[in-house]
Amino acid sequence: ALVKDAQKIETADEGETVDIILDKTPFYAECGGQVGDSGVIEGKSFKAKVLNTFKVNNLYAHRAEITEGNINVNDSVCAAIDTYKRKQTAAHHSSAHLLQSALRKVLGEGVKQAGSQVEPDKMRFDFSFDRAMTASEIEETENYINKWISEGIKQTTDIMDVEEAKKSGAMALFGEKYGDKVRVVKIGVISKELCAGTHIDNTSEIRLAKIVQESAI
């Protein structure tokens, strides 16, 4: 399908921005604080630059600018993600998991995640705590993360029932709605979380973590 201004359309021309719906896609849609993939969708008669990917109910919408030719409903296409952006985003998402584990080591297990924003060039981690962190606590947290990065710890992913996942000790985000089956992302013995995001295979791929700011809302 093609959608523009919340209306289904049959065709779109060069210069137009439309939402492209495919029967299957390699693109990750914005979810759980992680930004959506960008990249290229092209067919015989057109080329489109995908600016963002997001979900509407269970449909994946690719917000795209037609850069050449014209696209029609039922065209056969090749969809290719920006692999560099995906890899950078995955590294930041895995570093968010390591950050949560480090914070719980430094500040105690009362630390609870309250949200996050994961992008290709940075990530923000929101958590509940009753005071500001000290400079030495920030340094200690950063040191834990970089120690785990240097150890080259393997990441594994399992699909399991949501109750089974919680019983296994996997951390879940409070208030988040989960389906019957969930993905459990495990980084060695350091971290185990319910997560639908993309991740690196080994902590060494993160290379370095740097905490640049800590503040309260």
Image (cartoon, rainbow, N blue to C red):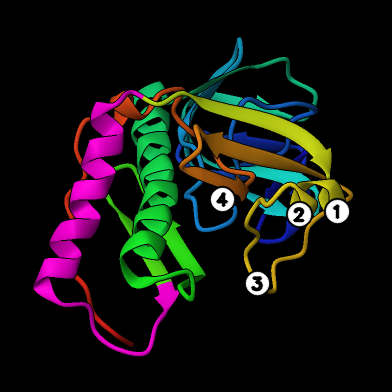
Instruction: Identify the mark nearer the N-term, 2 or 4.
Output: 4
Give the residue pinned by disc 3.
174
Magenta residues (range):
127-152
Badge 4: few (under 14), some or many (20 or more) residues near its Cα, within 10 Å? some
- In this image, 98 relative to 106: left or right? right
Give the residue pinned by disc 4.
30
Q: What is the spatial separation of the Cα atoms under label 1 and label 3, in whole angstroms?
A: 15 Å
Instruction: Identify the mark nearer the N-term, 1 or 3.
Output: 1
Q: What is the spatial separation of the Cα atoms under label 1 and label 4, in whole angstroms?
A: 25 Å
- Residue plotted at (76% across, 54% down): 166
Q: What is the spatial separation of the Cα atoms under label 4 and label 3, in whole angstroms?
A: 19 Å
Picture coordinates of residue 58 (x, y %)?
80, 49
Membership of 128 in magenta stretch = yes
Q: What element carries label 1?
A: helix
Badge 2: few (under 14), some or many (20 or more) residues near its Cα, within 10 Å? some
Q: How many marks?
A: 4
Q: What element carries label 2?
A: helix
Q: What is the spatial separation of the Cα atoms under label 3 and label 2, in whole angstroms?
A: 12 Å
* Front-most of residues 66 and 31: 31
Q: What residue type is labelled 1?
A: Glu
- Residue plotted at (59% across, 15% down): 45
Mark in the foreground, 3 or 2: 2
Contact flag, marks 3 and 2 (Cβ < 8 Å) = no
The numbered mark at residue 216 is: none
Badge 1: few (under 14), some or many (20 or more) residues near its Cα, within 10 Å? few
